[in-house]
Image (spheres, helix red, strand yellow):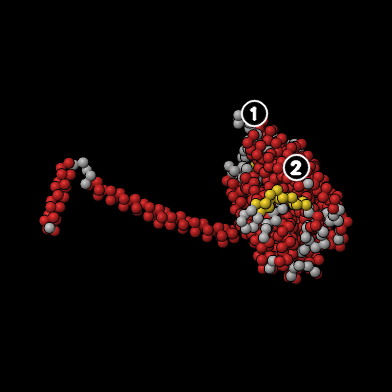
């Protein structure tokens, strides 16, 4: 079993190496047919190993579930009421003796790791296949597919790791791959800035994450996850609280939670398939996974759970309100992701790791589906802006049906998967109000925010659905700007590449662009088969995956959740129906501008953190120029002056040399007479 897990990690890792080094062999030719051939080879190198890795992950999950007979669909080791922790299989390749705390290179299989690994590999496979159509003709596709393979291997290492330092290696490689993939179209300054922002913000959290690992490892006498969990009863409460708070910093950064959430909306500048893989289903879920993996430690740290509850409450409602005011479809989904990840954090804070992981898996399926559907819409229309969309349900019937399933799951409507997992989350939060690990104030804040977010989620999902697929399309996307390429099968004159602003694609203004995008035209069509099939494949789990937990539905909580979601959806529909050409976000009134700017958190960070840092950097640069470099330049000028004096006696005049010699002899003679 451990060998199969190691193979599942190794296959995409080797694929990344082969794609980077061998996709252009022989000759490393570039341009025209050589690029097309390299892209075809890279596609096979990427898809086949990922498919094999997915098969292995499914095999491991099936074996573990059939052998253990879990009652919970997604058990969390060490969580209350879960017996999954005793059934883990651990294999150690070697132990590295560091002279103090040893590091074990090993893998761990249990219900948590095998379930999440299936999600990772299936979504990665769908994205790899989808990308062959979306980035067809992109000359950098080989490196793009290689970085996806490397990311897949890193995420699987995080999921299967039995040692915290091994987990940290995968954690950091994921961050590197995210930076490289967000900046895939680095020629656009907005894209490169978004990549740097994502890298730096997540690194801030990772500093705390690393110190949290050190605190746990040194206190437990080893970095093995089983060793750490076993040693928790012997640790002081201060040690556990400090370690979990430090870990929470890394979780907030990687899972885009308050206050380190600002990088995720800008990360939509990357290719849409990357948003589906990294920024919806896998990397941003890694933080939730780590909390679930070390859940016994968090359960012993009451103050940490209170902090997590407050952050989740602020993040879920604030991000949902921001999503309600966005015009960019991908940014709507980005803020939605922040909000839904906060739901998972809420379940963890409320004491239900199983509910959090259940929602993690279902959310990974339906949010990846929504991002891929968004890519198909952008591919057809040539813009990310919903103001340039409308009336697409007739031209894009497959995408319309799949998006409807995705939004139904996002809203928590039955029988979509999100209905069952969100019910578990809300039931856990409701229980925490009466009896749970949280203080009364934190529990009430969390419960109120969760219910309010259900309504706002119904509102922004309905708004995006109506503005994309109903009404009439505008004549042309506003603010069109040229791009650099067109995905296979896209309408003439369109591009799905970002333009001058983060996460914005535009029409290229080619021949007939206005006719193609105008109302009532037939230029818009479904994406090619390579993009449609992954959408159809992900629609199945987005619709049916929740049935795994159908036996435990809390019907009272579920009825309230559905009613509140329909209330938000109905409010948006009523506003939209009164004027289909106008944006229903006008219902926000004077708060619309604030929500559209996501409450100006970025501006606040620029003023409080970035501004002083830049001022200090300018001061240091000036001091370096005037003090350090000034001293160097001054010593150079002094050396030049001294050399000028020496040049006076080394000017090549023989008479001056003889005169000096005689003067010296005379001085010696006088001195000898006087002193003698």
Whichever of callouts 2 and 1 sits on the residue coming sooner in the sequence is 1
Judging from the image, what secondary structure is the residue with disc 1 in?
A: helix
The image quadrant that residue 419 belongs to is bottom right
Could you tell me how many numbered marks the image carries? 2
Judging from the image, what secondary structure is the residue with disc 2 in?
A: helix
Residue that carries the numbered disc 2 in the rendered image: 53
Residue 33: numbered disc: 1
Residue 10: numbered disc: none
* Rendering coords of residue 136 (x, y %): 68, 36
For the point 72% across and 53% down, the residue is: 162
Up the image or down, 588 lies above or below 499; here it is: below
Left or right of 175, for residue 127 = right
For the point 64% across and 46% down, the residue is: 177
Q: Nearer the viewer, residue 670 or 256?
A: 670
- Determine crowd level at label 1: few under 14, some 14-19, many 20+ residues with C-alpha closer than 10 A: few
* Rendering coords of residue 226 (x, y %): 73, 57
Up the image or down, 198 lies above or below 654; here it is: below
């Amino acid at each position: 079993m451990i060998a199969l897990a190691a193979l599942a990690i190794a296959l995409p890792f080797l694929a990344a190496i082969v794609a980077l080094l061998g996709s252009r062999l022989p000759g490393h030719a570039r341009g025209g047919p050589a690029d097309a051939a390299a892209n075809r080879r890279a596609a096979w190198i990427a898809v086949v190993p990922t498919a094999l890795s997915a098969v292995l992950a499914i095999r491991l999950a099936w074996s573990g579930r059939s052998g253990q007979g879990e009652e919970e669909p997604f058990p969390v080791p060490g969580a209350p009421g879960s017996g999954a922790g005793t059934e883990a299989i651990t294999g150690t390749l070697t132990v590295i003796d560091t002279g103090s705390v040893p590091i074990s290179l090993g893998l761990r299989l249990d219900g948590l790791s095998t379930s999440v690994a299936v999600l990772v590999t299936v979504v990665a496979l769908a994205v790899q296949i989808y990308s062959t159509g979306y980035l067809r003709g992109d000359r950098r596709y080989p490196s793009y597919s290689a970085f996806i393979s490397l990311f897949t291997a890193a995420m699987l290492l995080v999921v299967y790791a039995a040692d915290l330092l091994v987990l940290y290696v995968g954690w950091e490689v994921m961050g590197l791959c995210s930076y490289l993939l967000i900046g895939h179209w680095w020629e656009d300054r907005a894209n490169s800035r978004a990549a740097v922002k994502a890298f730096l913000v997540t690194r801030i959290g990772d500093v705390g994450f690393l110190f949290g690992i050190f605190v746990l490892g040194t206190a437990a006498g080893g970095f093995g996850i089983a060793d750490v969990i076993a040693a928790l009863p012997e640790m002081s409460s201060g040690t556990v609280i400090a370690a979990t708070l430090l870990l929470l910093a890394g979780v907030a950064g990687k899972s885009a939670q308050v206050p380190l959430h600002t990088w995720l909306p800008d990360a939509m500048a990357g290719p849409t398939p990357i948003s589906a893989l990294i920024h919806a289903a896998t990397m941003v879920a890694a933080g939730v996974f780590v909390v679930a993996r070390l859940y016994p430690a968090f359960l012993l740290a009451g103050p940490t759970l209170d902090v997590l509850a407050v952050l989740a409450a602020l993040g879920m409602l604030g991000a949902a309100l921001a999503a309600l005011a966005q015009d960019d479809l991908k940014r709507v989904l980005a803020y939605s992701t922040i909000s839904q990840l906060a739901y998972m954090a809420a379940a963890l804070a409320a004491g239900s790791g199983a509910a959090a992981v259940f929602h993690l898996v279902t959310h990974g399926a339906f949010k990846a589906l929504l991002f891929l559907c968004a890519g198909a819409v952008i591919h057809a229309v040539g813009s990310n802006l919903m103001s340039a969309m409308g009336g697409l349900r007739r031209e894009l019937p497959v995408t319309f049906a799949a998006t409807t399933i995705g939004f139904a799951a996002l809203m928590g409507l039955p029988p979509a998967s999100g209905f069952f997992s969100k019910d578990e989350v809300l039931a856990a939060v409701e229980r925490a109000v009466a009896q749970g690990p949280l203080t009364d104030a934190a529990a009430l804040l969390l419960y109120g925010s969760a219910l309010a977010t259900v309504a706002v989620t119904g509102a922004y999902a309905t708004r995006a659905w109506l503005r994309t697929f109903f009404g009439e399309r505008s004549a042309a996307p506003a603010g069109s700007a040229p791009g650099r390429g067109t995905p296979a099968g896209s309408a003439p004159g369109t591009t799905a590449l970002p333009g001058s602003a983060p996460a914005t694609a535009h029409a290229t203004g080619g021949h007939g662009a206005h006719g193609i995008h105008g109302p009532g035209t037939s230029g818009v069509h479904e994406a090619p088969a390579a993009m449609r099939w992954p959408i159809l494949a992900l629609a199945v789990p987005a619709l049916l995956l929740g049935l795994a937990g159908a036996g435990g539905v809390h019907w009272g909580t579920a009825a309230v959740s559905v009613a509140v979601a329909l209330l938000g959806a109905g409010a948006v529909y009523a506003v939209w129906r009164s004027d289909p050409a106008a944006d229903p976000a006008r219902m926000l009134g004077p708060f619309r501008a604030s929500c559209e700017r996501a409450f100006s958190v970025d501006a606040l960070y620029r003023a409080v953190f970035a501004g002083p840092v830049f001022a200090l950097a300018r001061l240091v640069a000036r001091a370096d120029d005037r003090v350090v470099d000034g001293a160097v330049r001054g010593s150079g000028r002094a050396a030049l002056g001294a050399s000028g004096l020496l040049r006076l006696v080394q000017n090549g005049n023989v008479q001056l040399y003889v005169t000096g010699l005689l003067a010296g002899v005379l001085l010696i003679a006088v001195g000898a007479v006087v002193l003698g």
